Image (spheres, rainbow, N blue to C red):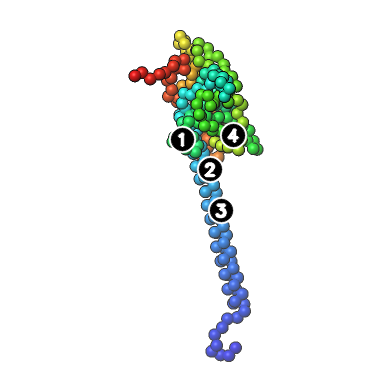
Amino acid sequence: MRRGEAGVTLIEVMVAVTLFSLLSLGMVMALRVGLAAYSKTEAKLMDNRRVAGAQRIVQGELEGMVPAFVMCGANSSGATGTRAVLFQGAPDSLWMVSTFSLQQGWRGQPQILQLFVIPGDESGVRLVVNEIPYTGAVGAAQYCTGTINVPNAISRLAQMIPTRAGAQTFVLADKLAFCRFSYYTPPAPYSNDPPAWQPTWAAKGWPLAVRIEMAPESTDPSRLQPISMTAPMHIRRDPDKVYTDDY
C-alpha cells in the first residue's frame, strides 16, 4: 500500500462483521424473549376473559329463569298431555327455561337450557350448556318423558330426556376438579324448619335459589379461576293456581 492511501485490513473487516453478527443475534434474542412474554401474557389475559365471560353467562342464565310449563305427553295426534313444571334439578344437571341466551343475550326468545357436567378430555370435568328455543308448553313436550308427584301440591314436575353433549354444546368451564348443583328449597307446609340447600329438586314450583359449586383442577395464582356462584330466583308464582287477566 502506497503512503497516503486510507484502507482497512482483512482482520479489521472480520472483527467488524463478527461484532455486527453478535449485536444482531442479541437483538433477535431480546425480540424473541419479548414476543414470548407478550404471548404468555396475552394467553393468560384471554383465559381470564374467557373465565369471567363464562361466569357472567351462567349468572345471567340462572337469574333469567322464567316459570315455564310443559304438557308432557302432548303430540300432533291430539293428545293434550299432562301439565308439569319445566324444571328438573339434579346434582349434575339442570333443566330450566331462561330469557337469557348465548347468542342474543337478553333480547332473544326464551330458551330451554340444559346445564350439565361431563368428563373432560384429559382429566377432571367440565360444565356445558345446550340451548333449545322454548316454543311453548306443547312444543316442549317432545323433551318430556313423564311427570312425578310433588308432596303437598297439585302441580307435578317434569321428567326430561337425558342430557347429551353435541356439536352445538357450549363449554362454560373446563378443567374442573368438581362441579355440582344444589337448590335452595323452602320448608314443607306447616313446618318451622328454615329453607335448606338440597342436591335434588323435588318440591313445589321452583327453588328460591340455585348454587353451582366448582373448583379448578389445578390452582394457578396468575390466572382467574372458576368460582362457585349463587343466583336467587325471583319467582313467586304458585303452580297450583291458574292466573287469568281480570277486566
Q: Distance between the residues labelled 4 and 2?
A: 15 Å
Tell me which amino acid carries mark 1: Gly
Cα distance between the residues tagged 4 and 3: 29 Å
Q: Earlier in the sequence, mark 3 or mark 2?
A: 3
Residue under label 2: 47
> Which of the numbered marks, if any, corresponds to residue 139?
none
**Placement of 45 over or under 235, stated as above or below:** below
Between tags 3 and 2, which lies in front?
A: 2
Looking at the image, is mark 1 or mark 2 earlier in the sequence? Answer: 2
Callout 2 amino acid:
Asp
In space, the residues marked 3 and 2 are separated at their CA atoms by 17 Å
Task: Specify which label sits upstream in the sequence, 4 or 1.
Answer: 1
Q: Say which residue appears at 50% left-offset and 22% top-offset.
A: 69
Provide the residue designation for mark 4: 126
Q: SS for tag 3?
A: helix
Amino acid at the residue labelled 3:
Ala
According to the picture, the residue beneath numbered tag 1 turns out to be: 108
Residue 140 place in picture, x, y as percent: 54, 26
Image quadrant of residue 169?
A: top right
Query: Which dot, 4 or 2, sits closer to the camera?
Result: 4
- Say whether disc 3 or disc 1 marks the residue closer to the N-terminus: 3
Q: In which quarter of the image is the N terminus?
A: bottom right
Q: How far apart are marks 4 and 1 (CA)?
A: 26 Å
Q: How far apart are marks 3 and 1 (CA)?
A: 41 Å
Q: Nearer the viewer, mark 3 or mark 1?
A: 1
Of 94 and 40, nearer the camera is: 94
